[in-house]
Amino acid sequence: LASGLGKGAKEFLHAVSLEVLQLGANIAGFSEALALGDKGRHGAAAEAEGAGAAMAAPGASSSSSFPTAAAAAAQPADIRQGLQQASTRLSSGIQAALLLTNDDTYSHRLLAAAGATAGAIKCTLLGARNQLDPERFLNNIKSEL
């Protein structure tokens, strides 16, 4: 009986961890899309908005968190890939913020940097989630093809 309770608690904590990581990634994706808006958005930001837009309604299952096969393929498979994508996204966002001309307002630069940071956080959280549940990640990719 005790081992069954321990196993159930472990599975519950695993499921909660996956959902918390997914929720964090969705929030970061929405934040990135809001910060970047339509002006100056690049492919990574557009992908982030697509993944964020797939957030399930309250009470619904979040297993359909991949809107397209292209968005699913762009998802990091593990934490290492998530950190690599985060580094790339953060670097390109900071470069974009630095390239803004003097005519652009200070707030535009802040938004570009904030969007890059949110995108980096999203990539990292998705990588962690996908590493914890690679079967779900692979099933989502297969179902979208």
Image (tube, rainbow, N blue to C red):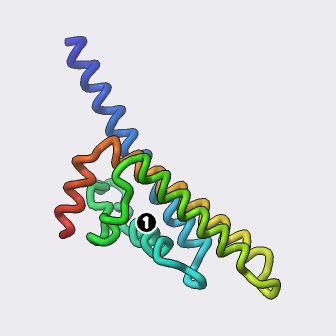
Kindly give the residue lying farthest to the right in the view shown. 102
Tell me if mark 1 has few (under 14), some (14-19) or many (20+) residues whose alpha carbon lies within 10 angstroms of its own.
many
At which x and y percent is residue 120?
54, 58
Q: Residue at x 58, y 79 (%)?
A: 37
Kindly give the residue lying farthest to the bottom in the view shown. 103
At which x and y percent is residue 52?
43, 66
Q: Residue at x 80, y 75 (%)?
A: 106
At which x and y percent is residue 86?
52, 57
Amino acid type, label 1: Gly
Residue at the disc numbered 1: 52
Left or right of 1: which side holds 80? right
Residue 7 versus residue 45 in the image, above or below:
above
Q: Quadrant of the C terminus?
A: bottom left
Quadrant location of residue 36? bottom right
Q: Element under label 1? A: helix
Residue 72 versus residue 106 in the image, above or below:
above
Q: Residue at x 65, y 75 (%)?
A: 96
Q: Quadrant of the N terminus?
A: top left
Left or right of 25: which side holds 94? right
